[in-house]
Image (spheres, rainbow, N blue to C red):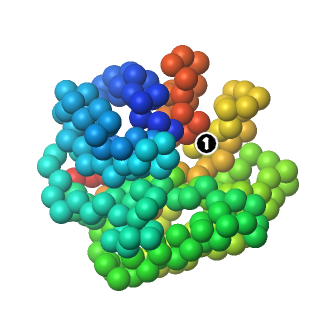
Amino acid sequence: MKICTYNVNSIKSRKELLFSWLNTRENDIDLLCLQELKCTEEHFPFSDFQNRGFHCDVFGQKTYNGVAICSKFPLNHVQKGFGDEHWDQQKRFIAAPAQGFFLINVYAPHGGFKGTDKFFYKREWYEILFHYLHQHYSPEDPVMLVGDCNVAREDKDVFAPQILQDSIGTMPEEREELRKILDWGLVDTFRYLYPEKKQFTWWDYRGGAIWRDEGMRIDYVLCTQPLLERIKDVEVDVWPRRRRSPKPSDHAPLIISLDEE
């Protein structure tokens, strides 16, 4: 089984590229977790995905945010949002049981400079996510959390640590929030397999950053210990990020290969 997490930065703008990319992989993705849809459910291209064998569950929002799980097998008991009216105003969370494990797809807030409302909102959102995990799951459960976390865990996860020090995505307070999620009982699968490998998932549009590999690793597949033995590989596919036309997302897809139960 192959599970992909991909911040598309507008499904409308990226639909053509997304399906072209799936063709390059011979349609080997079984679960496709999307973030930053920037559209409501009624404007999501369900039929295009159905033609590719995907059934999609969408938690969408006009212009901003939005997450979806597209699956080649039926999903039941899909949860859209935390179940909190305030925190679900921004559509950033969707979850469902899937083939022997619990799948959670998130789009964490980008945040803002230290001391701003967006800075505090991001930290509070992570606290809500932590409490959700604590209340609904145990580290002994097979849980996989994927998505755009908008935090680079360590200095080796950014191209220029000194230049980017204490900037959005690298601030100690943000890294501490992500560390709490991991300390609850989740493992960063990419670092589990590749402890020292330099690999980014996001590159700024400006200045040709993708061609100089000046990026950050802010997209993750995190899982609990019961799933670790099923992991075969975790890879970043830069093909769609290196396209010039149609314009790509600023993220690349992150794919995990998982043995069947």
Q: Residue at 33% across / 52% down in the picture?
A: 59
The amino acid pointed to by label 1 is: Trp
Considering depth in this image, is 50 or 72 the residue closer to the camera? 50
Residue 110 vertical position relative to residue 46 in the rendered view, above or below: below
Considering depth in this image, is 13 or 50 the residue closer to the camera? 13
- Considering every residue shown, the one lying at the far top of the view is 245
Q: How many marks?
A: 1
Q: Secondary structure at mark 1?
A: strand
Q: Residue at 25% across / 49% down in the picture?
A: 57
Q: Is residue 144 visible?
A: no
Q: Residue at 40% across / 41% down in the picture?
A: 39
**Residue located beneath label 1 in the image:** 202
Residue 74 in the image: state x and y as whole percent.
Answer: 14, 49
Judge from the rendering whether residue 198 lies leftward or rightward of residue 18; answer left or right. right
Considering depth in this image, is 7 or 114 the residue closer to the camera? 114
Judge from the rendering whether residue 167 lies leftward or rightward of residue 50; answer left or right. right
Query: Badge 1 local density, few (<14 within 10 Å), some, or many (20+)?
Result: many
Q: Quadrant of residue 80?
A: bottom left
Q: Is residue 110 visible?
A: yes
